[in-house]
Image (cartoon, rainbow, N blue to C red):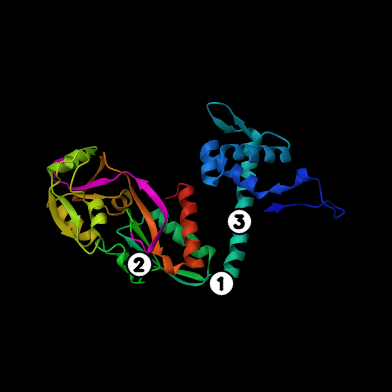
Amino acid sequence: MTVTSRDSTGGRRSPASTVEIRELECFLILAEELHFGRTGERLYVSQSRVSQLIRGLEQRIGGRLVDRTSRRVRLTVLGEDFLVALRPAYAALRATVEDARAAALGLSGTLRLGFQGSVGYGFMEVVGEFEERYPGCATRITELPLCDPFGPVHRDEVDMAVVLLPVEEPDLVLGPVFSRQPQCLAVSRRHPLAARAAVDAEELAGTPLVGVAAPAPDYWREAQAPTRTPSGSAVPQGPVVGTLQEGLSLVAANRGVMLLCRPTTEYHHRRDVAYVPVTGLPDSALGLVRRADRDNAQVRAFAEAVAAADAAHRL
C-alpha cells in the first residue's frame, strides 16, 4: 500500500514524499524489537530487506532514524520523535481499514469461545477490544471441562477454544499459539514442597501427580501429567479428575500435586494451595483451535487479534 500526496496545484509530488506503508510497519516493529533479525522474522522478510526498508524511509524523511552498531540498535532523537507521532496515526489508519474490512465482510453475530480453567486477564482484554472493533459481533464464553479440551470444538458447541498444547487433532486448525511460560506445580500448603522457591522436574518422582480423566486423548493427558521424569524415573500416578476445581480440591487435601500453566495459577488463588515454579520441563503454551470446516471471517478476525496481542507481548 502506498500513500501519495499532491501539491497545491493538484499535481503529484516527488517520489521522496511518497510514504510506503511497509516502511512504516518495519520501523514500528524495529522500534519494539531493536533487533534487525527479529524484526525480519516478524515481517517474514530477510534482515537485509529490513535494512533496505529503513534506509528507504530515512531517505524520504531526510534524516537518520536508527543508529546501528555491531552490538546494539537504538533510535536517534529524530527516530524517537517520529515514533511518538507515528504510533497513533498508524493505529488510526489501521482501524479505518479494519472497520471497512468488517463492513465488507459482514462481520456480525455471536462468536462462541471456549476456554480451560482460565485464559488470563490479557486475553479477556483482547475479547473486549475485539467487540469494540467489531460492534456487530458478540462473544459468548464457555468454560470447557479439563478432561475434554477438544470435544466441544469437534461437536460444534463452540467456534474456537483456548486449550493447552499439545494439539494433534487432524481435523482442527491450531493458531495462534501464545502465553509460553514455565509450568508451575500446585501443592498443598501442608506439602514439604510448598515452601520451596522452585522444584526440579526430577522431584516429581517423589509424590503422586494428579492426572486428567478421559475422554481427553492419551497424548494430551500424558503432556499434562507425565508418567516419567525427563531422566526416565517413574512418576507416581495420583487420582484423575475431570475439572480443574476437582484437581485443586484434591491438591488442597494433599492427595497429590498438579502441573498447571502460569495463567491458571495467577487466576485461581487459594489459601490452602501453593504454586511453585518447575524447572526441567518444557514451557506450557496456550493455543486457539477451531474446526477446519468452520473457517469464516469472524474466526479469522479474532485469531488475528490474538496474534497481534501476542506479538505486542500482551499475552
Q: Secondary structure at mark 2?
A: helix
Q: Give the side of residue 136 with respect to residue 199, left or right.
A: right
Is there CB contact under 8 Å for labels 3 and 2?
Answer: no
Give how far apart the Cα atoms at labels 1 and 2 are: 23 Å
Q: Secondary structure at mark 1?
A: loop
Eyeballing the image, is 140 above or below 257? below
Q: Mark 3 against mark 2, which lies toward the viewer? A: 2
Eyeballing the image, is 50 above or below 144? above
The disc, 3 or 1, on the residue closer to the chain's N-terminal end is 3
The residue stretch that appears in magenta: 169-193
Give how far apart the Cα atoms at labels 3 and 1 are: 18 Å
Q: Mark 3 against mark 1, which lies toward the viewer? A: 1
Q: Mark 1 against mark 2, which lies toward the viewer? A: 2
Give how far apart the Cα atoms at labels 3 and 2 are: 31 Å
Question: Which of the labelled discs sits on residue 94, or is there none?
Answer: 3
Question: Which of the labelled discs sits on residue 2, or is there none?
Answer: none
Magenta stretch mostly in which secondary structure?
strand
Question: Which of the labelled discs sits on residue 153, or is there none?
Answer: 2
* Residue 25 picture location, percent across and down: 60, 47
Q: So how many labels did they put on this image?
A: 3
The disc, 1 or 2, on the residue closer to the chain's N-terminal end is 1
Is there CB contact under 8 Å for labels 1 and 2?
Answer: no
Amino acid residing under circle 1: Gly
Amino acid residing under circle 2: Val
Task: Rate crowding at label 2 as few (under 14), some (14 to 19) or many (20 or more) other CA atoms within 10 Å.
Answer: many
Q: Which residue is mark 1?
A: 106
Query: Does 106 lie within the magenta span?
Result: no
Residue positioned most to the right = 9
Query: Does 190 lie within the magenta span?
Result: yes
Which residue is at a point 30% across and 43% down the rendered structure image?
Answer: 282
Which residue is at a point 50% across and 52% down the rendered structure image?
Answer: 308
Between 231 and 253, the residue placed more toward the observer is 231
